[in-house]
Amino acid sequence: MERRQSRTARAEALRGEQSYVSMLYERLDVVRDRTREALRDVLARGGSGTRQAMVEREVTADEHARRLSQLSAVERGLCFGRIDDDRGDTLYIGRIGLRDDEHESKLIDWRAPAARPFYVATPADPGALVRRRHLHLRDRTVTGIDDEVFDLDRMSEADRRTLVGEAALMASLRRGRTGRMGEVVATIQTEQDRVIRSGLHGVLVVQGGPGTGKTVAALHRAAYLLYAHRATLERRGVLVIGPNAMFSRYIGQVLPSLGETEVVLSSVGELHSGVHAVEEDSEPAAVVKGGLRMAAVVEKAVRDRQRVPDGDLEMAVPVRTSLRDGVEVVVEEMTVRMDHASCVRARDRARTLLRPHNLARDAFVRQVLGALARDEATQLDRPVDAEDLRYAAKNLWQYQAVRDALDGLWPELTPEDLIRELLSDEDVLRSAAGPYLSEAELSVLLRERDAPWTVGDVPLLDEAAELLGEDDSPARRRERLAERRRRAEETYAAGVLAINDLGELMEASDVADRHRDDGPTITTADRAVRDRDWAYGHVIVDEAQELSEMTWRTVMRRVPTRSLTVVGDVAQTGSAAGARSWGEMLDRYVEGRWREERLLVNYRTPVEIMDVAADVLSAVAPGQTPPESVRYGEAAPRAVPAAQTDLRHLVESELRGIGEGRLAIVTPDARRAEVAALFPETADPLDATVAVLTVVQCKGLEFDAVVVVDPGAILGQSAKGGQDLYVAITRATRRLTVVYEGELPEMLRRLDGSPGRRLGEGDHAGEARARSEDPAG
Ligand SMILES: Nc1ncnc2c1ncn2[C@@H]1O[C@H](COP(=O)(O)OP(=O)(O)OP(=O)(O)O)[C@@H](O)[C@H]1O
């Protein structure tokens, strides 16, 4: 690879690239102006015409608005690469594709097949490429270029194994962390590219150690799939599930910055619509709730609510009423009756319909009312033909006593009511759990009625929703839809107008009104969020190792086609209800039909810190191999005894070490509050210079510096304490300090008496491409 270029040649190359890039931005401006004009035209046409015309106008306006937001999102770093092949052809690679007025391609979308060589060419296997160039832009100015010239004859063996676009990659990895994940289109690595462009269908498991870019690759995969399979996915949408709401915020910018705004992000605690669970269960409760037996428990809880009286069903109903002072009073009552065996038959018949509880209720109610009406007619010696009975049954339904009795036998239930009662009423729980759970398991589930929802409750709520169903009579459906729409309309309207100053043409309420008729209901993503039964076109699950069996049931319901990307690392499983292997969770749904890609290179954590993590991993999961780091850090990791350490001083000195970056203090669960009290509070830990987090909270995140407090307590806090410590240590991109109480845990011995060797700036050069090449590795 030739890296030396004379200064003048370089300046000339920069000028050449600048002129091309300026042309691309001019083109972007033209396309934007045209799209904005087109949107104005559509909106200005107003809200009249046939219904068909209005619907078409809405669809067109939506398309223009979406295109406009995509064109706005790609302003930064529009073009980032160029490839030259052995036939003398040149292609420029960017965030979107652009053509000139003659329809000639000027910029290739990074997701297009033609862009692929940019990501997969390596010096050992360059394909037809003779050169790959990375362009660095600040605003619209080209500030630098990095070339890789593929000339195998002149390359050393080490260089042949080099990373894709090494200089650009290293520059990107060295940047201070901002608290939000960024896109990496310019430096996607070959193994990641394979993940990103893997086919849409079936289940793809992406297994990789910490920092191997699983999350970032999965998000780029979402953007790629929307590009390559737009027709399929635009209708059904893509759902990305992360471990918690903070993680969703952490990754929330990546897809919009790639011009994709149609992906739904959800945490596991938000998978049941209307519930935002953040609390975690105790470990024993999480294990019980996460086990598949809970599906049977919830089912039994529903059946327990389909009751019959111990004896005959009897109730007093008015026979004669009269008006007294304008008030109707009962002057004569009679008792109507349904015998016990008939009640049992009515219940069993309603059950055999195999409809969800709330939908089968109607059949039960009709049968009971019919029987009571027949009894009433017999007693009063009235005719019993079908028409009369129907009338009499309707009449009975008017009486509150009748309704109350039927509600007692077969009530209409919400998932929330059912699960709240199940977990807080010992008798109810014992009856439902009897055949499935032991007394000890039952007792870990019991809690106060007003306890907040936990993440482990969400699959139970979802299970209940599935078994209960919603009363979908047309009137109820309309009511529900109207309410859900109303909430989303204003937000959507404001969004449309915010894109490019359309406020002068229309008020937000106008746009909302246009959507209030029965036209297309807002975007696919909006519709998907609002509909519990929505089936997504593709689902991506991140930190998937944490999902319990019950959560997998919930996830699978969202994607009946089983088109999934499952991303995680079984060596990092912290939840006792989580996965020990992928087969354990997936074979139940797609036995033998899931494929696995492994990511082996760690882009986050430097070699020195990864060595410490590797010791922890080999102690807690002897068979697992940690990923190999691509670079060295700037400071050797160290351990300091808590007794001799002022945490605030330590943090201050670490902050000085990282300059502009972010620092996390990772504590045992029980010590978070105490440690957090030492530092100023911020609304969102992602925005804090110093974030104090538990291991669960820091999962998936990364920080320039990490201080792990009391590793012994982290190890001891659960059966997966070793995995927790592994996660905590691997959050660091530059510096790691462990503050230990008493004795340093054996698996961290490497840190004992560490002289705190600081590597100079020069040590970054060359980085850790292959650890065997460097004696310090
Ligand atoms: N090709 C790449 N170019 C630039 N940066 C990259 C690349 N791949 C990964 N990174 C960076 O490496 C870091 C780790 O990536 P990511 O968080 O996706 O890893 P992960 O495998 O999900 O980690 P964990 O399992 O620990 O959560 C991120 O800062 C990401 O931006």
Image (spheres, rainbow, N blue to C red):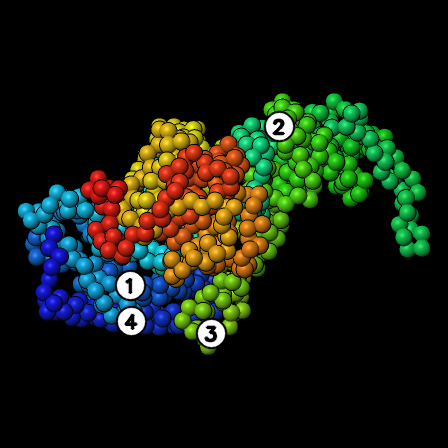
Q: Amino acid at mark 4?
A: Asp
Q: Is residue 107 visible?
A: no
256 vs 146, nearest the viewer = 146
Tell me how far mark 2 sits from mark 1, CA to CA.
55 Å
Residue at which label 4 appears: 29
Q: Amino acid at mark 1?
A: Gly
Q: Are marks 3 and 1 in contact (CB under 8 Å)?
A: no
Identify the element where label 2 is drawn: helix
Left or right of 684 in this view: 202: left
Tell me how far mark 4 sits from mark 2, CA to CA.
63 Å
Q: Is residue 317 visible?
A: yes
Disc 3 or disc 1, which is closer to the eye?
1
Left or right of 121 in this view: 655: right
Marker count (numbered): 4
Disc 4 or disc 2, which is closer to the eye?
2
Disc 4 or disc 3, which is closer to the eye?
4
Please tell me which residue is depicted at 58% across the width and 39% down the height of the picture: 281
Tell me how far mark 4 sits from mark 3, CA to CA.
21 Å
Residue at which label 2 appears: 441
Left or right of 246 in this view: 613: left
Please tell me which residue is depicted at 53% across the width and 57% down the height of the picture: 679
Identify the element where label 1 is drawn: loop
Please tell me which residue is depicted at 58% across the width and 32% down the height of the picture: 284
Q: Are marks 4 and 1 in contact (CB under 8 Å)?
A: no
Residue 455 position in % (x across, y down): 55, 42
Tell me how far mark 4 sits from mark 1, CA to CA.
14 Å
Mark toward the start of the polypeptide (4 vs 1): 4
Residue at which label 1 appears: 77
